[in-house]
Amino acid sequence: MSSASSESVGESAVITRHCGFCLKEITGEAIKICGKCHKRAYCSRECQVTDWSPKKKGQGHKNWCELDCGEEDLDWSVTAIPGKGLGIVALRDMPAAYKIIVEAAVDKDHPGVADLMPQDGSLDRKYHLNRRQTWGVDDNGAPIVVVCLRTSRANHSCAPNASSFYDKSVKVF
């Protein structure tokens, strides 16, 4: 993991990113970048280590680190949309079949679940409201539902422009 340097354009511009694990906003020299893909940002070594392995309740970044895929704050952002809440907005044109957002499901005790809507809701309510159905079924034949922190923030359908799928080989959406 390496530190990111701030860029300057005329006046000093500060880079802002979001931690790949805890989603905390980080700026300037506090940004730590994955040493392998050079895209994923972290606020600390602890978040990077936790995010690397799905066994530690992270996103399992090691499973998809080398994929050519989008990354928050570089390719897309979670942005406030007037009158609609938060939405996911592209920051650049993306080619057909590009993996825009790659993320793993998280458990209810992940720190990012506390930031989901409803703001004053319990963790159970937040988890229930923000879950999505996968393409699988459990041992009882019931649909498997999960929470993915970033796509849970989308308040619109991406269906006109993108599709969603589960990649079993790397265990991510």
Image: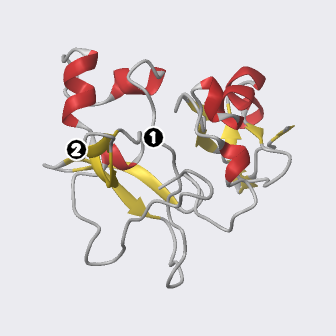
Q: Is residue 134 left or right of 99 when viewed as pictured?
A: left
Who's the residue at 54% across and 28% down the image?
A: 22
Residue 32's spot in the image, x, y percent? 76, 36
Q: Nearer the viewer, residue 151 or 83?
A: 151
The residue that mark 1 highlights is 105
Who's the residue at 22% across and 44% down the image?
A: 142
| Label 2: element kind | loop
The residue that mark 2 highlights is 142
Who's the residue at 62% across and 54% down the image?
A: 170
Q: Going from the N terminus, do you reach mark 2 or mark 1 first?
A: 1
Residue 168's spot in the image, x, y percent? 54, 57
Residue 127's spot in the image, x, y percent? 27, 28
Q: Nearer the viewer, residue 64 or 118?
A: 64
Residue 60's spot in the image, x, y percent? 64, 41
Q: Is residue 54 left or right of 148 when viewed as pictured?
A: right
Amino acid type of the residue that numbered disc 1 sits on in the rendered structure: Ala
